[in-house]
Image: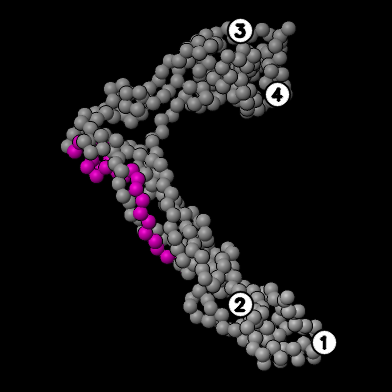
Amino acid sequence: MAKDYYKVLGVKRNATGEEIKKAFRRIARETHPDANPDDAESEARFKLAAEAYEVLSDADRRRRHDRGDTIDLNNLFTGMGSLDDLLRSVFGDSPLFGGQTYRAPRGRDVLVRAEVSLEAAAFGTEVAVHYQARVTCEECSGSGSQPGSETLTCPECGGGGQVRMAQRSVFGTMMSVGACPTCRGEGVLMSDPCEVCGGSGATVGNVDVNVEVPAGVSNGTRLRLGGRGESAGRHGQPGDLFVEVAVMPHPLFEQHDSTLVYRANLEFSEATLGTRLGLPTLEGDEVELDVPAGTQPGTVFTIPGRGMTGLGRRRRGDLQVVVDIVIPTDLTEEQEEVLRRWADLRGERADRPASAG
């Protein structure tokens, strides 16, 4: 019985070329021998899917298949470049199928911590951070070569950094592209390596950086400075510097995003009869708050625009004033007598506790 390649790929008979390609990509990724070593069943499925794609992706072969003709594909897995070319037409130079694209080395990222006050977090500031990391070698300016010496073009890859290599697989010999083993993908060789860095182009050193902390940061905010991390040495890209902001606790305010919370302690009489408070602010001045008579514990008053600046925003948040009632513990005899008379007038019980013993 003739093979139904539409069924093999799981597509309809009127499937487009892109749908056929997508189906083959999915099956190939699941069944390729590189991803399933020593799995005969996966290998067989992969070969069958490759056959189906080779037929259905070609207009003439597809018409012959639809008529029920027999199609000879015996050389699909034997030619040096046949299957290799088929896979590259679908996947490109994917590492899964032997292709390797050289990437310049990249230095490690660096994470440091910077402490700032709440006021600095609210209005922005500049902080100096200090850390130790691999930095560009000053002796050779990161080239890795002794000053005055020359670099040589790699004879293996001709300066391109890549070479084509033949690899044997269950499907025969396949070609792949990889980093040149002689120059490690750099394309050049050093005739006289730098004595300070040993040819790496980087040494360990101390780094001092001034960092702009924007207004509105909160505790744990991370600032990224691209290219200020560790050096990768010659021909590489430096890593990034991440500064984690630690906002120090404030004696008066609590920060909740762009909102500041201030707890105002009121005497019993102030909450009962009402009062006017002078409240501190981050700017160092005062704002007045009228507290109405009968204010209850836990009441929250909002003063707009006196909180934190939102990160990346111009508008400031609010200052929320939470009322706490202070119960006196050091009454004089006269004060206690007056309070008891007040309790009697209110019909409240204010009995003295029984004496111990």
Residue 108 is situated, as x and y percent measured from the top left of the image, at 41, 42
Residue 196 is situated, as x and y percent measured from the top left of the image, at 23, 38
Position of 245 relative to 43 (above/below): below
Q: Earlier in the sequence, mark 4 or mark 2?
A: 4
Queried whether the magenta region covers residue 69, the answer comes back as no
Position of 291 relative to 58 (above/below): below
Q: Earlier in the sequence, mark 2 or mark 3?
A: 3
Residue 291 disc label = none
Q: Earlier in the sequence, mark 3 or mark 1?
A: 3
Residue 347 disc label = 1
Q: Where does label 2 land, which residue?
A: 264
**Quarter of the image where one finds residue 342:** bottom right
Q: Earlier in the sequence, mark 4 or mark 3?
A: 4
Q: Earlier in the sequence, mark 2 or mark 1?
A: 2
**Quarter of the image where one finds residue 294:** bottom right
Q: Nearer the viewer, mark 2 or mark 1?
A: 1
Between the residue at mark 3 and the residue at mark 1, the CA separation in whole angstroms equals 107 Å
Q: Residues within 10 Å of mark 4 (few under 14, many from 20)?
A: some
- Give, as a three-letter code, the residue at label 2: Ala
Between the residue at mark 1 and the residue at mark 4, the CA separation in whole angstroms equals 87 Å
**x 74%, y 88%: residue:** 340
Between the residue at mark 2 and the residue at mark 3, the CA separation in whole angstroms equals 89 Å
- Give, as a three-letter code, the residue at label 1: Gly
What segment is highlighted magenta in the picture?
Answer: 123-147
- Give, as a three-letter code, the residue at label 4: Val
Q: Nearer the viewer, mark 2 or mark 3?
A: 2
Q: Residue furthest right?
A: 347
- Give, as a three-letter code, the residue at label 3: Asp
Between the residue at mark 2 and the residue at mark 1, the CA separation in whole angstroms equals 29 Å
